[in-house]
Image (cartoon, rainbow, N blue to C red):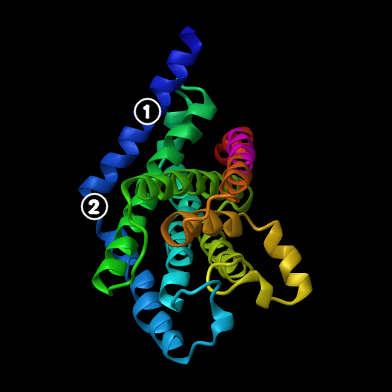
Amino acid sequence: MASATKFVSSALTIAEMEARKIRHDSSELWMRAIQPALWLVVFGSALTELRSSQLTEGNFTYLQFMSAGIIAQSVLFVAILYGVRLIWERDMGMLTKLLSTPAPRASVVVGKTLASSVRGIFMAIVVLGLTLVLGINLRLDPLDVLGVFSVVILFAMAFTAFSMTLSAFLGTQSRMMAFGQALTMPLFFASNAIYPISLMPRWLQYVSEVNPLSYVVDAMRSMILTGVYTQVPLDIAAIGVFTLLMMVSASLVLRKLVQ
């Protein structure tokens, strides 16, 4: 019981320290908000004018259909590059000091990923706010919005932990930046974020079935668009398993980063 209390206390302390950095300097997040705005205002609006009924599933506009995908994309871009920040902390000696404390490595990972999920929720709020400004009709019932935030937290934690794992092997900020940027587009386009899986070639459909982003988008789309929740338990289970695997992986390799 004492060890569990220590773990939770350490994780929350680290999360609070990381979240405090966001409060002191949120300019990075506001700059990142430009990208989802461009996707909705420019890309989405253009395809709405040109759209075929094949671009959506059900009786929805294309902007409605892609909104969940843009939330997922925004969170992904924030989380996947967290490893750059971690390498910077190592280079400044901050990570070495943190790992020398009695805090378990796993609590360090949990704390940092929880703080990253705060960034993810910020991006989700920005995108949902944009949908209101653009008049995109979504299901924004409180329980549905809370469900979206819950998925965002899991998703942000998973890909932050994944980024932390990558940083231990890539070792430098430039490599981490290049690899993270190269990885986001394949993950994004090999998912159901901006078009239905049924439109993909057969081989890409198989890829999308193992792409965690597809499950994230499907769960959020069910909550804020279709209102059909039959696949949500499977989506949440898949996201949860992926998150757990990434957290364990990051915990195992974290010390490698400072060796």
Q: Position of residue 134 (x, y in %)?
A: 28, 75
Total marks placed: 2
Amino acid, disc 1? Leu
- Front position in the image: 92 or 160: 160
Amino acid, disc 2? Asp
Q: Is residue 247 magenta?
A: yes
**Residue at the right extreme, as displayed:** 203
- Above-or-below relation of 125 to 2: below
Residue drawn where x is 68% and y is 73% of the image: 198
Residue 19 is left or right of residue 221, and the answer is left
Q: Quadrant of residue 258?
A: top right
| Residue indicated by mark 1 | 12
Q: Position of residue 6 (x, y in %)?
A: 44, 15
Query: Circle 1 — which element?
Result: helix
The image quadrant where one finds the C terminus is top right
Q: Is residue 82 magenta?
A: no
**Residue at the top extreme, as displayed:** 2
| Residue indicated by mark 2 | 25
Q: Position of residue 67 (x, y in %)?
A: 42, 67
Q: Which residues are magenta?
A: 241-251
Residue 176 is left or right of residue 206, and the answer is left
- Of badges 2 and 1, the one in the foreground is 1
**Residue at the bottom extreme, as displayed:** 50
